[in-house]
Amino acid sequence: MQADLIIHNIKTLITPYPSDLPVCNDAFNSIKTLENAFVAIKDGTILEVGTGNYQAFVDATTELYDAKGALAGPGLIDSHTHVVHGGSREHEFEKKMAGVPYLQILKEGGGIHSTVNATRKISEDALYAQAKKSLIKMMEYGVTTVEGKSGYGLEKDTELKQLRVQKKLDQNLPIDIVATFMGAHAVPEAFKDNKTAYLDEVISWMDDVKKESLAEFVDIFCEDHVFDAKESEYLLTAAIKKGFKAKIHSDEIKALGGTELAAKLNAVSADHLMAITESGMDALKDSHTIANILPSTSFYLNSTYAPVRKMIDKGLAIALSSDYNPGSSPSENFMLTLNIAAIHLKMSPNEILNAATINPSFALNRQGKIGVLEKEYQADIVLYDAHNWPYVLYHYGINHVKDVFKSGHLIVKDQKYLKE
Ligand SMILES: [Zn+2]
């Protein structure tokens, strides 16, 4: 079969091996490497990944794209962000640096409250424009699929506004945005003595979310002073009954049993896990739930990192995400997340590639479609201006991405997003 597009003159191509299950154990430190490679693409899908001569795929209409000796890998998948939100929090950053505790900032109406207020007030157009700017940066850093959550409304109209804006962005921009409804991100002041009543409200909004196809996943913040494991089970069980898949923010500060709950409910991912226990690790090991690690948040808060080496040794399937949000991880630079994973989580380059491509495809229920450069996968491809993958992780803090293809279309050229 003839290709629409052939990317050739790739010095080195790196990719996870295809797998029907999340990658863990010995396979987690293993990737496939091809030298002098090409990728042939037809209708946005990979027709062939090979080395040497590609003439068999060329006809008069085939476009040839010279990678000029670049390193090529799969489009990166950032499977945990809060990309659609109003406002920013630089005023609190100064207080935080001066040593004012987060609880004090929260009491003064700051922290998550300030983002909730800003997100409630902002118009749909302004919310769209702010998130669009972030999504363009993400694409320029090699991200071709991103997850985004609601959760800065804590009231029906704003939660739906966030998700509607996100859906419009997904339709209008080349990046794929996978949506999660997270009305249970915090407890609104009015419900602080009756969390179940709030959860019942959130559960009732799920019907609106479903009706407009605004989200595939439902997430909850299982944490001390937010929602406990029982409350999380109550909400997620209702969500699963309504046809959503579950995700959970668990063991970020305190282990309350949220990770064990994720395994029990067959959640696609348990996220954060800085305070994960032996029992949480055992539960994940016996499940298909991805351990989604967000090291940029630990870095930015100057706090503890998830015990990832131990989790890898136990055989857990690890993914890495940026957790992009205005409070604890205000950076769209996913490449920096990968640098931090190398430096602070002590992950190897091969492990990091698997954790930023194939494993997050499972956390987003897109396995078999994205995250691997192999026949029949979506042609989401990043070309790096680097001689090898370890160099990208070692030479930190800058953008090594040169060009990005989404479904076979060039969307970023020389680090610049090509306007639609
Ligand atoms: Zn989060």
Image (spheres, rainbow, N blue to C red):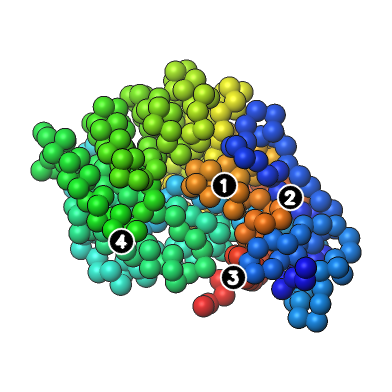
| SS under mark 3 | strand
Q: What residue is shown with label 3?
A: 411
- Crowdedness of circle 1 by 10 Å Cα count: few (<14), some, many (20+)? many
> Residue 272's x, y, as percent?
43, 36
Q: Residue at x 33, y 65 (%)?
A: 165
The amino acid at mark 2 is: Ile
As drawn, the label of residue 212 is 4
> Circles 2 and 1: CB distance less than 8 Å?
no
> Residue 80's x, y, as percent?
45, 47
- Classify residue 269 by image quadrant: top left
Give above or below for 312 relative to 136. above
Count the marks. 4
The amino acid at mark 4 is: Glu
Q: CA distance from mark 3 to mark 1?
A: 23 Å
Q: CA distance from mark 3 to mark 4?
A: 28 Å
**Mark before the other along the chain sequence, 3 or 4:** 4
Q: What residue is shown with label 1?
A: 367
Q: Is the CB atom of the residue marked by disc 2 within 8 angstroms of ligand 1's nearest atom? A: no
Mark in the foreground, 2 or 1: 1
- Classify residue 60 by image quadrant: bottom right
As drawn, the label of residue 14 is 2
Which of 223/161 is in front?
161
Give the quadrant of the N terminus. Answer: bottom right
**Mark before the other along the chain sequence, 3 or 2:** 2
